Image (spheres, rainbow, N blue to C red):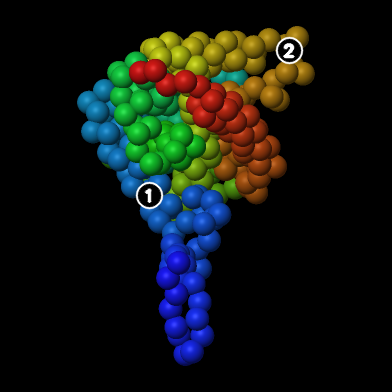
Amino acid sequence: MSTVDVTGVTAEAGPAPVPDAAPGLREDTPASRRPGAARAWLRLLGSEAGLTFRRPRNLAVLAVLGIIPVLIGVVMRLFAEPIAAEAADGPGNGGAIFAQITGNGLFLTFAALSVLVQLMLPVAVAVVAGDAVAGEAGGGTLRYLLTAPAGRTRLLAAKYGNAVLFCLAAVSVIALSALVTGLALFPIGPITLLSGTTISFAEGLLRIGLVVLYVTAGMAALAAFALALSTLTEVAIGAIAATVVTVIVIQVLGVIPQLAWLQPYLLTQWWNEFDGVLRDPVAAGEMGQGLLVFAAYVVIFGSIAWARFTGKDITS
C-alpha cells in the first residue's frame, strides 16, 4: 500500500474526508428543519392556490357567494318595512340583525353571513376540500405529485393550507359584497349593537373583520373534515356529497331538544356565535369556546387525514 511522507511522518494514504453537506447542518437533521423546506412548502402552497383560484368551477362558486348579499340587500331595500318588522319578531339574534339593516347598512354583512354560513358557504368549502386528494386520485395525477421530493405530509399540509385560503377568500367575498351593497342602499353611521351600546363606524368595520376571521376558522374546521373524507376515496363527488350531507344531519341534530347534551360538540352550533361581536363587551367567552371546538375538529380530522394519506398505497 502506498504511503506519503508529510513533514517526515510516513502514513497510509486513506480516503479524503467527506465535508459536511452545509455548515451547521448535520446529516441527521430532519428534512422539515433544513433550510429551504419552508420555501419549498410555500411554493407548493402557491401552486395549489393558483390551480384552485384559476379553476372556473371555484370562481363560479365565489361569484354566487358574492351575488347573494346583493340580492338580500335589494330585497331588503324594496320590502324594507314588512321584512324588518317580521324579522324583529323572529326567534334568535338572526331576526334582530335583519331588523337593523334598514337603519345601518353595515348590518347587511352580519345578516348575509348568518344566512350563508348555514349551507351555501359549507358547500363551497366542501367543493374545494373534498376534491383536494380524491380529485387528484380520481384524475390519476396524485402519484405524479408524490414523485416530487415534497413528501406526503408536506403535500397534505399544502392542500389543507390551500383549503383554508379558499375559506378566507369565500368569507371575504361575502363580507365585501355585503359591505359595498350596504353602503350603496342603506344609511351608514354609528352602529347600535344588539346590547344597546352605540359604537363608531370605524369600530364597526373592525368588528366585521373579527367576524370574517371567526367564520373562516369555522369553515377551516369543516375543511379538515372534508379533507379527511377526501383521503378515504378516489371519487371527489363522494367526499363533497358526504360533507354536505353531514352538515345537514348535524344541523338537524342541533335542533332536537332531546339531544341538548350533544349540541355543544356539534360543529354547526358554533358557526353563528360570531354575533358575539354585536354585544358590548364582545362575548369573548362564547366565541372562545367556538374557536376551541374548531381547533378540536382540525386536530382530530387532520390527524385522520394524515394517518390515512401517509399510510395508503397510491395506485392512481
Give the image quarter of residue 21: bottom left
Residue 144 coordinates in the image, percent (x, y): 32, 29
Check disc 1 and give the amino acid type.
Ala
Residue at the location (45% across, 31% down)?
113
Residue 212 coordinates in the image, percent (x, y): 46, 41
**In the image, residue 52 above or below residue 115:** below
Which disc is residue 183 wearing?
none
Residue at the location (53% across, 16% down)?
247
Residue at the location (45% across, 14% down)?
233
**In the image, residue 228 above or below residue 22:** above
Residue 33 visible in the snapshot: yes
Residue 167 coordinates in the image, percent (x, y): 42, 34
Badge count = 2
Circle 2 — which element? helix
Give neighbour class at mark 1: few <14, some 14-19, many 20+ (Cα, 10 Å): some
Q: Residue furthest front?
A: 1
1 or 2: tag closer to the N-terminus: 1
Which disc is residue 259 wearing?
2
**In the image, residue 220 above or below residue 209:** above
Label 1, label 2: how many angstroms apart (C-alpha)? Answer: 47 Å
Question: Label 1: which residue?
Answer: 40
**In the image, residue 310 above or below residue 34:** above
Q: Nearer the viewer, residue 34 or 82?
A: 34
Residue at the location (51% across, 85% down)?
9
Q: Nearer the viewer, residue 298 or 263?
A: 298
